[in-house]
Image: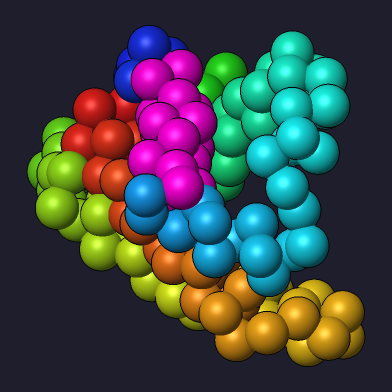
Amino acid sequence: MEINFIALLLAAIVTLVVGFIWYHPNVFGTIWMKENNLTQEELKTGNMLKIFGLTYVFSLMITMTLMSLTIHQSGAVGMVGGPPLIANAKPSFHAFMADYGTAYRTFKHGALHGFLSGLFFAFPVIGINALFERKSWKYIFIHAGFWIVTLTLMGGIVCGFA
């Protein structure tokens, strides 16, 4: 199973692109700022290189996780000890990969798993933190919606092209 690292690098950009649109003042940005008691001036004071750079690094970490969530063949590769040990795998592994190596490797399938990851992982994590921080449901739905859309697109890219 070959990994297309360019697809992973591109999938990591999705958080920035979707975030640019999602948190734009004409979409959810104004509501998001209000829910966080932030102003445009306060948002301009951050270190943008650090914020966007670390966002991209964290997004790369997410793409690596999405590989195992969206690409079912990752489990088979893991069972033989990972990519370095594929050459020494038993013939049954090679037969399995010959039969099923590209099964469910589509954008649509990855998008489904990305969506489910957003709905059943990101949404509850955001919800739990927000409840303890006494944040509103608007806050929860804005952030959860962002991650559901983002993980859906990232999952599709990772599964379909990585």
Task: For residue 121, say whether it is visible.
Answer: no
Residue in front for this viewpoint, 116 or 69: 116
Quadrant where the image shows the C terminus: top left
Query: In this view of the protein, can residue 130 be seen by the observer?
Result: yes
Image x and y of residue 18, in percent: 40, 40
Question: Which residue, as the protein is rendered here, is positioned at the far right?
Answer: 132
Q: Nearer the viewer, residue 92 or 85?
A: 85
Q: Does 88 sit above or below residue 90?
A: above
Q: Nearer the viewer, residue 14 or 92?
A: 14
Magenta stretch: includes residue 14: yes
Q: Quadrant of residue 145?
A: bottom left
Relative to 72, 16 lies left or right: right
Location of the N terminus by quadrant is top left
Q: Is residue 57 magenta?
A: no
Residue drawn at x 34%, y 36% is 158
The residue under the point 76% across, 81% down is: 135
Residue 68 image offset from top left, x and y in percent: 48, 48
Residue at (56% x, 79% y) in the render: 138
Q: Is residue 136 left or right of residue 112?
A: right
User: Magenta span covers which residues?
Assistant: 9-25
Place of residue 8 in the rendered image (x, y in percent of width and height, measured from the top left):
43, 24
Q: Is residue 69 above or below residue 55?
A: below
Residue at image position (81%, 38%) is 42
Q: Residue 83: x, y in percent?
A: 52, 24
